[in-house]
Image (spheres, grey):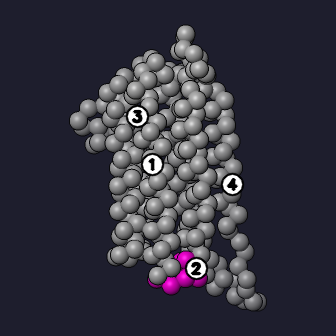
Amino acid sequence: MAAAEEGSGPPEGQVGVSETDRVKAFSDGVFAIVITLLVLELRVPDYREGGLLTGLRHEGASYLAFVVSFGYIGVIWLNHHALLRLVRGTTLALNWINLAILFGAVIIPFPTAVLASAFSEGDSADQRAAVAFYAIAAALMSAPWLAFFSYLHRHPTLRAREVGPEYVRSQRVRPITGLILYGLSGLLGWFVDPVVGLIGIIVMIIYHAVTSEGFRAGPLGRLFPRGG
């Protein structure tokens, strides 16, 4: 389904409904800052003469964590961009839900730093804890997305003109999947192997990248993403 053009005004005659331009501009600014903060976790390793290559290898976990989280923030931004195309107006409640989504994005540098530290300096117990912590943070980030789709489903006047209720309802599958499978990745990382849990997290990031434009409405929506 097509959405209304970006920058379109709020529904006419709706008290407390405002345009989405400021929300989009503020959100893009937050994502830009967060994705920049990730690079602060990268550092030149301490090394003696002739030991630079060894030092760089020692920091390999930090580089991998940076790449994964950079991709994660990029995927969240793509999903958020598609999310705001579904609405033609916003309310105070929807703004709060959007802030909760941004809060989830803002905290990513912290579990990223924990993950890099555990795989660079820690033992297997530290790595299990770090993967579980990252997965829990990612799972909790799915909750406000579910709230956004649920709110939009209950307030049809806020939806872009060509976005129907069935389409909005079908999108709730994605955050529910995130809650479940990120949580499962954390359990795998804790009880089975931290690398297995990390692979699960990466697979989920890829899943959200592939479905960033949403699912088609209907029973086959899970298999056929919108635009696929």
Asked if one can make out residue 2 in the rendered structure from this viewpoint, the answer is no
Question: How many angstroms separate mark 1 from mark 3 (CA)?
Answer: 13 Å
Residue at horizontal 49 percent and vertical 22 percent from the top: 158
Q: Amino acid at mark 1?
A: Ser
Above or below for 136 versus 162 = below
Question: Residue 125: within the magenta?
Answer: no
- Residue 186: percent from left, percent from top: 40, 66
Q: Which residues are magenta?
A: 118-124
Q: Amino acid at mark 2?
A: Ser
Q: Amino acid at mark 4?
A: Thr
Asked if one can make out residue 144 in the rendered structure from this viewpoint, the answer is yes
- Residue 71: percent from left, percent from top: 54, 55
Instruction: Categorize mark 4 by other alpha carbons within 10 Å: few (<14), some (14-19), many (20+).
Output: few
- Name the N-terminal-most of marks 4 and 1: 4
Question: Residue 121: within the magenta?
Answer: yes
Question: How many angstroms separate mark 4 from mark 2 (CA)?
Answer: 22 Å
Q: Secondary structure at mark 3?
A: helix
Instruction: Categorize mark 1 by other alpha carbons within 10 Å: few (<14), some (14-19), many (20+).
Output: many
Residue identified by numbered label 3: 150
- Name the N-terminal-most of marks 2 and 3: 2
Residue identified by numbered label 4: 36
- Contact check, label 4 and label 1, Cβ < 8 Å: no
Q: Residue furthest right?
A: 49
Residue identified by numbered label 2: 120
